[in-house]
Image (spheres, rainbow, N blue to C red):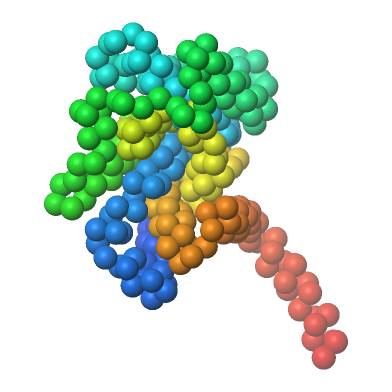
Amino acid sequence: MPKRLTNPFNPQKLLRWESFLVVLILFEVVVFGAINPRFLRLPVLFGSFNDFTSICIISIFVTFVLITGGMDIQSGSIVGLSSIVLGVTWASSGLNIWLVVVFTIITGALCGAFSGFLVAFTQVPSMVVTLGCSFLYTGFAKTIMKIAKIETHKGISNFPASFTAFTGWSIGGVPFQFIIFVILAITAHVLLHRTKYGRYVFLCGINQNAAEYSGINSRFIVMSTYIISGMGASLAGIILTSYLGTAKPDFGKELTLPIITAVVLGGTSIFGGKGTIVGTALAALAIGVMRFGLSMSGISTQYLDIPVGFLLIIAVGLRALSGNWGEVKKLFYRAKPAFSRSK
């Protein structure tokens, strides 16, 4: 009898982890609902999504970067830059707002392409590149504001009603922003898990040299993930500008920690080669619900990053522990006789 081929992608493991994330979300809803019954009202619960849309959208595209073994901490600065590019271009050029939206997404893609080129073709660590670019893009946004002679704290407002209205739409009580997120998550899932490009992304994360020897242009694949991430951040900046009705350069400055936490908590390995879009999407929702629930429980917004930081540490620790579980068991069995003698 020939041996049965085994699939390295184990859906049962994925199901268990995703189930845990679903239980986590339900647990948060129950706990915060008990603390503040208003939290359980569907309009309030659906409306809360508007406050963390950016985290959800950006995280599903940053997943591509981390699967290749890279790191992307520049997304927040691209959000602010995109908001300013959108506002200044529209105010100064008089172009149709939707043409400006397309131009803004291209801007995000160019930012990602620049960072991705440095990572892929110069072998500079992605952490260093994206950290430097985060300062660079924030500086660009402030410079554009200064050239346009616009005060930073005031920002740019008075956008067309058609632009500010679409983030206020809802279908059957479900916010349009949530629908956008679901569509993007499905698209990203298909791209990553159902296409040849997605397989190449995973191969580059597992072993980039082996992928190169297999005929894959690994440098282009790595660079393309940063382009995708930049476009996602730019789209989040556009949605945030529409929702708040103003453009400011500091949009996104507090998004880096929640985004990375959502990707890692969703099951993506920080060493590359592993990750799912569904896991990231559920983790982003869990983080968003937690932040909103804490704020409704009376916790000041300046302390909301503390539990997110704990989640990041726990997620990384659990992943490291699961990857070395055999060694942990050996240490336990070696220590067991010593504990028995001490008794």
User: As rendered, which of 117 and 177 lies closer to the eye?
Assistant: 177
Residue 293 drawn above or below residue 230: below
User: As rendered, which of 126 and 85 lies closer to the eye?
Assistant: 85
Q: Is residue 61 visible?
A: yes
Instruction: Give the image quarter of residue 45.
Output: bottom left
Instruction: Give the image quarter of residue 219.
Output: top right
Instruction: Give the image quarter of residue 340.
Output: bottom right
Residue 225 drawn above or below residue 32: above
The image position of residue 103, as x and y in percent, is 35, 15
The image position of residue 89, as x and y in percent, is 38, 14
User: As rendered, which of 69 and 248 lies closer to the eye?
Assistant: 248
Q: Is residue 7 visible?
A: no
The image position of residue 61, as x and y in percent, is 42, 34
Q: Quadrant of the C terminus?
A: bottom right
Q: Position of 288 compared to 183: left or right?
A: right
Q: Position of 5 compared to 177: left or right?
A: right
Tell me the residue at 20%/28% (across/down): 162
The image position of residue 130, as x and y in percent, is 60, 27
Tell me the residue at 22%/29% (across/down): 161
Tell me the residue at 69%/64% (across/down): 328
Tell me the residue at 44%/43% (across/down): 55
Q: Residue furthest right?
A: 342
User: As rendered, which of 186 and 150 lies closer to the eye?
Assistant: 150
